[in-house]
Image (cartoon, grey):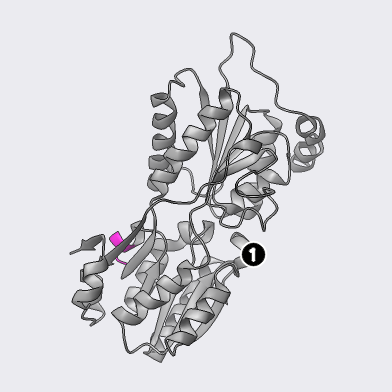
Amino acid sequence: MRRRTVIAGLSWAAAGWPLAPRADEPALVVALWPFADGNAEGHALSAIFRTALRDRGQTTLRIEDRWGGADVERTGVLAAEIVQSGPQVIFAFLNAQLSALSALSRTIPMIFVGASDPVGSGYVASLQRPGGNITGFTLYEASLAGKWVAALKEAAPAIRRVTLLSNASTEVRRGNFYSEALRTAAAALGIEPAVCMVGSAGEIEPVVADLGQRGDAGLIVAPGTFSEANGDRIVALTAAHRVPTVFAIRRFAHRGGLMSYGPDPADAVRRAAAYVDRVLRGEKPATLPVQAPTKFDFIVNLNSARALGLEISSALLAQADEIVE
């Protein structure tokens, strides 16, 4: 009953722009994160967000965090509570969070990080002129699938099959954002491509175990809320089943994954804080262009390569921005 009451009460909150705070009240900014409360990575990004706002002179803001984890239902409930609270700006990290929020308000300003296809998803009219209440910073583009496949093939020349692990509930285009680029890159390298949708953490191990039994397969872990929540589990399983794996999220290469290639989320969060500041000072999301990452990092974990019996070529190591030993 409580959830019905909350959602039913949204109509008045979503009908107009959020009320300006009284002179004696600080402006409210609420952030919705794809991490569980207490998650170290989530709290580190929250601290970066707060520091970036403070550095821009926003010293009296009231900033609140909401932690939805990979739970789609909980994320929806939190999104409803956030919209009902009437903040001056909402910050959404990753697509599943923005999807839940944007469905409830087209008036409250929202700044996102990580919605990879904002035009195709209907969040903005165009990248240059978003046109509504939403703008922000993408993290990944579909063509990255080609980079991931090429890195895997060079690191493990014997692979004949590559599987993209994805999640339809939380990722862009129901998990199929990278599929076409994956198939194109795999065909060019003579590799059989596959996309595997997993709906829960319990479904990951059978997929990894099957790849391990093949002995000639590699894995790509698509970025998103699901992989943020389950990355450590995937690292452990791919090590146990000896499956060469490339992650989009950089920290999992540091935690034992073979490789990662992707942007720095901390940089994107800092840039998003600048947009939040500009909106609080009177600019409209409609006129702030959606921006892409400016730098991607390739990280190779040599310890993991040795454990898998792989000898990483000097050519591939020369491309690495960071080598974990």
* Vertical position of residue 210 compared to residue 201: above or below: below
Q: For residue 262, which quarter of the picture?
A: bottom left
The outermost residue toward the front is 128
Q: Position of residue 285 (x, y in %)?
A: 62, 36
**Residue 168 can be seen, yes or no:** no
Question: Is residue 139 left or right of 88 when viewed as pictured?
Answer: left
* Vertical position of residue 313 compared to residue 128: above or below: below
The amino acid at mark 1 is: Arg
Residue at point 21%, 68% (across, down): 318
Q: Where is residue 102 in the image (x, y as percent from the top left)?
A: 69, 45
Q: Quadrant of the N terminus?
A: top right
Residue 7 inside the magenta-drawn segment:
no
Q: For residue 310, which quarter of the picture?
A: bottom left
**Residue 69 can be seen, yes or no:** yes
Camera-side residue of 234 and 133: 133
Q: In which quarter of the image is the C terminus?
A: bottom left
Q: Residues within 10 Å of mark 1 (few under 14, many from 20)?
A: some
Q: Where is residue 156 in the image (x, y as percent from the top left)?
A: 31, 83
Tell me the residue that label 1 is attached to.
173
Residue at point 59%, 53% (across, down): 95
Question: Is residue 269 left or right of 17 when viewed as pictured?
Answer: left
Highlighted range, magenta = 253-257
Q: Position of residue 286 (x, y in %)?
A: 66, 37
Residue at point 62%, 53% (across, down): 118
Residue at point 35%, 61% (across, down): 252
